[in-house]
Amino acid sequence: MVSSIRVTTAQWFSTLKSRKLCDCLQRQVWCLRFGIVPPADTYWEDLRALALSSGLHSVAVTSADPLQRAREQIENRLERNLVNGMQFTFRNPVRSTTPTMSVEGAKSIIVAARSYDVRDAPDDDALGKYPARVARYVWHDHNAALKKSLEIVKKRLKADGHRAVVFADDNSVVDREVAWRSGLGWFGKNANILLPGVGSYFVLGCIVTTVELPVGAPLDDGCGPCVRCLSSCPTDAIVSPGVIDSHRCLSWLLQKPGVFPREYRVALADRIYGCDECQSTCPPTQRSSVTGEVPVAITSRHRRHIDVVWMLSAADKELLDACDPWYIHERNPLWLRRNALIILGNIGDPDDADVRRALEAMLRSNEPVLRAHAVWACARLGLTHLLSGFDTDPDDMVRAEFAHLPTCRDDL
């Protein structure tokens, strides 16, 4: 009897167009036939336990219905010109807010958070003379560790006959909206998801799957009247609760190609990648009760700081390897050096021969963007005697920089 059922089932499945879909459906048929499919609540508890044991710190579920609220917010930001060339989920709002476009037949989204709150992590072997700060979320490649954990849960789902796709650091799904709708956390005024009792030092990822799971509900706002994140932003980029003007946000300006806006260079201070101010001043994040274990990383050390003079002299490959987890436009080290020049202007010592040599090398660069920012850095350090002839530089960008030289730093 069983063998005849197998033949009939095999013949039926062989007519389906998708082999993957065939395999999933076949497993589901046999699971149902032999009564080994657990109730949705029980199944979710099993998945949740697996997720937590795999290195994820919090997980929740929402439906795979369209993220209509997120789509409206994205379109609103675009209409208000707050995006400033940022792509990611702004590139294709319809796709990013329609999970079934990424996984056909999807019914549920499992969303997960993995902590990067490694407060006692060791620093680099050597800071160098001019260390620049790196945002906490890229001290290690935490997204790689997140994906590894999510893949374990995905493997279980697929073994049980369900389709499942992992999305982490991916523009296919607006993961913050999924986290909010599932009840994983609430939206802080800094536009980050805050987890109850833990705060926002997390990377988020999700699994879009065809299995129907019990869903959570959004949490009440946990911020109350607190506005510390708004007042702590060094460029006033949080223009209203939950709304960021990317023309002012240092995290985005550090990633965006082109000329770094003059009006925000001093505010950049010593930040080379990212800006943690709106998180580090947040009370729930300060009271965090979770400290993530040091995850497997691409590099062997925590990259909490990086020396900017070294960045200006390092070979391209060496520099990119040192900054491997960072988003760098087209993986071009040009933008890393542009940022390093601004920081050198903010923290460098004009009497240091290494500083002068680094600036002189950048003033001779074939790249106009590096010459332009080197001109600015020299003026900040009072080294204007190095700028003879730059008023007639062949590039408009460099001449414009020379025409708007900043005053020398007050501390020099």
Image (cartoon, grey):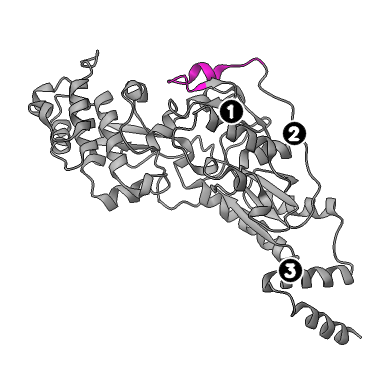
Label 2 neighbourhood size at 10 Å, few (<14), some (14-19), many (20+)? some
Gap in Å between the C-alphas at discs 3 and 2? 31 Å
Residue 278 x, y percent position in the rendering: 51, 25
Mark 2 = which residue?
218
Q: Amino acid at mark 2?
A: Pro
Do residues under tags 3 and 2 come within 8 Å of each other at their CB atoms? no
Mark 3 = which residue?
24
Q: In the image, what residue occupies the spot 44% across and 36% down?
A: 85
Q: Earlier in the sequence, mark 1 or mark 3?
A: 3
Residue 220 highlighted magenta (yes or no): no
Q: Is residue 155 above or below residue 53?
A: below
Mark 1 = which residue?
285
Q: Earlier in the sequence, mark 2 or mark 1?
A: 2
Q: Is residue 93 above or below residue 12?
A: above
Q: Amino acid at mark 1?
A: Thr
Do residues under tags 1 and 3 come within 8 Å of each other at their CB atoms? no
The quadrant holding residue 94 is: top right
Tell me: 17 left or right of 287: right
Residue range in magenta is 225-238
What is the secondary structure assignment of the residue under circle 1?
helix
Q: Nearer the viewer, residue 113 or 384?
A: 384
